[in-house]
Image (cartoon, rainbow, N blue to C red):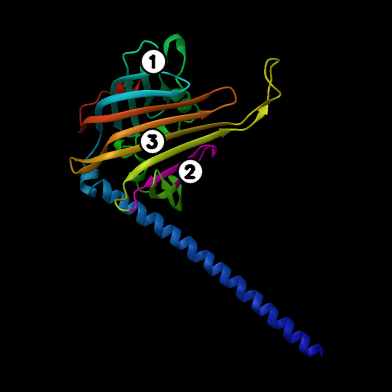
C-alpha cells in the first residue's frame, strides 16, 4: 500500500515538473516571437522610409507649408496660417504662425540641452505648450513629427528606448500594428504608443497620454476632491510622397484632448507641407526662442 502511494506521489511530481517546463518553454517562445516581431517591424519600417544610403545622406530637414487651427472645446478659434519644421538631430524647431493677436501660434524648440516653448499675449501658455512643458520627451527623443524629423528615434541603431510589440488594434476603421515606446530612463508616467500600417509599415500615428490622479483640494475655494485629469496628444500622418529617395508624409494632424476637473479642451492643428528640403544651411540660432 505504501509503495503504491509513493509511486502515485512520484508520478504527480513528475507531471508537475513537466507542466512547469512546458509553461516556461511556452513563455520563452512567446518572448522570442515578440522580439522577432519588433525586429521585423523596425526593419520593414526603415525600408518604408527609404534605402540605407538615402537615409544616411540626409543631415538635416526643412519643411514648410500651411496650417489650420480648429478649437472644438475650450476655444472657438478657427484660423489659418503657416508652419515650418527644422531638424538637425538632436536639435528640432517647430513654428506655427497665425494672423491672430490672441493666438499667434506655437513655438516649440529643443537645442540639444533644453526644451523651450513660446508664450501667448500676457505671458500665457497655450494648452499644447503646457503639454510639452510638462512632458518634454516627445521633443527630446525626436518623436514629435514622426519621420518628418531627422531625430525620429526608430532611425537609430540601437533605438534609445524600450519597445514592446502589442499586437494589432483597429483605429479609425484600420487594423494597425501597435508598438509601446518607453524611455530608457526617466519618469514612466507618459504612455507612448506608435501605430504602423500593416501593409506598408509606415508610421501613421502616435498617441501620448498621461494622467494626474485625483487629489484633495488645498484651498478654501476648492472642493474636497479634485478629479483625475487626462491629457492625450495624438499625431496622424498621411499623404506620403517621395522626396530625395525618402517616403515622407506631407499631411500631419495634431489633436490635443484634455479632460480636467475644472475644464475640457479639444483642439486640432492640420498641417500640410508643400516644401521639404534636405541638407540646407541652418544657423544654430534657429533652435532658440528669443
Q: Does the stretch in magenta take in 185?
A: yes
Name the disc covering residue 184, or none. Answer: 2
Precedes in sequence: disc 1 or disc 3? 1
Which part of the image, by quadrant, shows the C terminus?
Answer: top left
Which residue is pictured at 63% across the width and 29% down the height? 227
Name the disc covering residue 235, or none. Answer: 3
- Give the residues drawn in magenta, as a range: 180-198
* Label pair 2/3, CB-CB below 8 angstroms: no
Relative to 38, say whether 100 is above or below: above
Residue 156 pos. (x, y %): 34, 45
Q: Nearer the viewer, residue 205 or 92?
A: 205
**How far apart in space, not on screen, are marks 1 and 2 (Cα)?**
36 Å
**Whether residue 159 is visible:** no
**How far apart in space, not on screen, are marks 1 and 3 (Cα)?**
21 Å
Which part of the image, by quadrant, shows the N terminus?
Answer: bottom right
Relative to 209, say whether 36 is above or below: below
Q: Is mark 2 on a helix, strand or loop?
A: loop
Q: Nearer the viewer, residue 77 or 251?
A: 77
Q: Nearer the viewer, mark 2 or mark 3?
A: 3
Badge 3: residue crowd in 10 Å (few <14, some 14–19, many ≥20): many
Badge 1: residue crowd in 10 Å (few <14, some 14–19, many ≥20): some
Amino acid at each position: 500500500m505504501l509503495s503504491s502511494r509513493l509511486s502515485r506521489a512520484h508520478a504527480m511530481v513528475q507531471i508537475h515538473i513537466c507542466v512547469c517546463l512546458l509553461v516556461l518553454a511556452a513563455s520563452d517562445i512567446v518572448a522570442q516571437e515578440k522580439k522577432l516581431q519588433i525586429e521585423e517591424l523596425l526593419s520593414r519600417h526603415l525600408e518604408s522610409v527609404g534605402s540605407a544610403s538615402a537615409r544616411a545622406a540626409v543631415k538635416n530637414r526643412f519643411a514648410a507649408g500651411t496650417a489650420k487651427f480648429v478649437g472644438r472645446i475650450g476655444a472657438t478659434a478657427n484660423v489659418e496660417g503657416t508652419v515650418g519644421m527644422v531638424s538637425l538631430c538632436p536639435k528640432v524647431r517647430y513654428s506655427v504662425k497665425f494672423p491672430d493677436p490672441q493666438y499667434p501660434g506655437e513655438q516649440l524648440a529643443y537645442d540639444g540641452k533644453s526644451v523651450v516653448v513660446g508664450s501667448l499675449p500676457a505671458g500665457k501658455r497655450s494648452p499644447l505648450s503646457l503639454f510639452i512643458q510638462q512632458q518634454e520627451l516627445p521633443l527630446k527623443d525626436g518623436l514629435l513629427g514622426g519621420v518628418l524629423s531627422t531625430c525620429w528615434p526608430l532611425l537609430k541603431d540601437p533605438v534609445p528606448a524600450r519597445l514592446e510589440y502589442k499586437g494589432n488594434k483597429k483605429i479609425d476603421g484600420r487594423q494597425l500594428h501597435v508598438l509601446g515606446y518607453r524611455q530608457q530612463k526617466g519618469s514612466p508616467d507618459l504612455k507612448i504608443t506608435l501605430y504602423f500600417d500593416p501593409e506598408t509599415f509606415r508610421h501613421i500615428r502616435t498617441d501620448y497620454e498621461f494622467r494626474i490622479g485625483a487629489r484633495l483640494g488645498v484651498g478654501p475655494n476648492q472642493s474636497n476632491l479634485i478629479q483625475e485629469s487626462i491629457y492625450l496628444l495624438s499625431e496622424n500622418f498621411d499623404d506620403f510622397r517621395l522626396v530625395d529617395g525618402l517616403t515622407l508624409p506631407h499631411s500631419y494632424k495634431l489633436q490635443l484632448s484634455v479632460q480636467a476637473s475644472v475644464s475640457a479642451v479639444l483642439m486640432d492643428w492640420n498641417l500640410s507641407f508643400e516644401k521639404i528640403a534636405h541638407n540646407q544651411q541652418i544657423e544654430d540660432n534657429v533652435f532658440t526662442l528669443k
